Image (cartoon, rainbow, N blue to C red):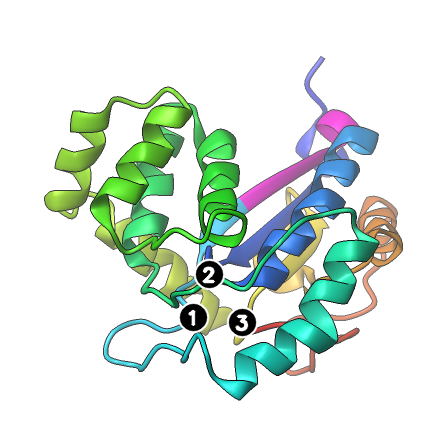
Amino acid sequence: MTVPTDNRVRITVWSDYVCPFCYLQEPVLERIRAEYGERVEVERRAFELRPDPLPTLDPQGEYLRTTWDRAVYPMARQRGMTLRLPPVQPRSRNALEAAEFARDQGRFDEMHNALFRAFFEEGRDLNELDVLLDAGMSVGLDREQLRAALEEGRYTEKVLADERLAYELGVQAVPTMLVGRASDPLEAAEALSGAQPYEYVRAAVERALQGNRREKLRGTTFLPQLPTL
């Protein structure tokens, strides 16, 4: 039986495939989904950290190395994940569009995970077409159909629409999660910014199920604030 929207929680997540904290949040979200089943829906939306013409980060620079040493590697060990600092810092628009193609093919979750693994475990450049096509093939997508979708920019507007909505709601960093009842507007959701521990996300889900909210999105700061990019 499908759970009515009044009794279901929606977690809307803005993330980017070049953000390590977005990848580090995945085990928490999967645990929540496993625990709550149909009572929790995870809705994923795109957010480019550094769209053109903003400069990308220097993969050998002090900022990234310090961030990884102080935050990424310790959190990865804590969550039982293996990440390594990628040798490149690519644009992510094409990867986000590839994920949207996969969504239309019913393979979003698989592609979502494949893109994270390709970048943070294999160190592959997500701005290279062949890397995206390889990821797609690995999860059962048609290589040439994916190529055509990317070359034609078929999903560009979908990615841009997600980003416009993020800006309208005040989302400024990733990962950002809006946790609220599925029947309520996103503006009414509680905002969690950063790679949150399971206990914090679960508490937000419980508040939403009970109709309570600790923090609205508009006119407030995100609490609690944990690592983001």
Residue projecting furthest to the bottom: 62
CB under 8 Å between discs 2 and 1:
yes
Give amino acid for label 1.
Answer: Leu
Q: Which residue is found at the position 35% from the left and 40% from the top?
A: 100
Q: Is 171 drawn above or below residue 55 in the view shown?
A: above
The kind of secondary structure element at disc 2 is loop
Gap between marks 2 and 1, in whole Å? 8 Å
Q: Which residue is found at the position 52% from the left and 70% from the top?
A: 169
Disc nearest the viewer among 2 and 3:
2
The magenta stretch is 37-43
Give the residue number, with chain letter if any, for mark 2. Answer: 18
Give amino acid for label 2.
Answer: Val
Residue 205 covered by magenta stretch = no
Quarter of the figure with residue 195:
bottom right
Disc nearest the viewer among 2 and 1:
2
Where residue 52 appears, as percent x and y from the top left, is 25, 74
Disc 2 or 3, which lies upstream in sequence?
Answer: 2
Where residue 51 appears, as percent x and y from the top left, is 31, 71
Q: Which residue is found at the position 24% from the left and 45% from the top?
A: 155
222 with respect to 163 (left or right): right
Q: Is 14 drawn above or below residue 149 in the view shown?
A: below
Dot 1 alpha-carbon crowd within 10 angstroms: few under 14, some 14 to 19, many 20 or more: many
Gap between marks 2 and 3, in whole Å? 17 Å
Dot 2 alpha-carbon crowd within 10 angstroms: few under 14, some 14 to 19, many 20 or more: many
Give the residue number, with chain letter if any, for mark 1. Answer: 49
Give the residue number, with chain letter if any, for mark 3. Answer: 171
Which mark identifies residue 111? none
Image quarter where the N terminus lies is top right
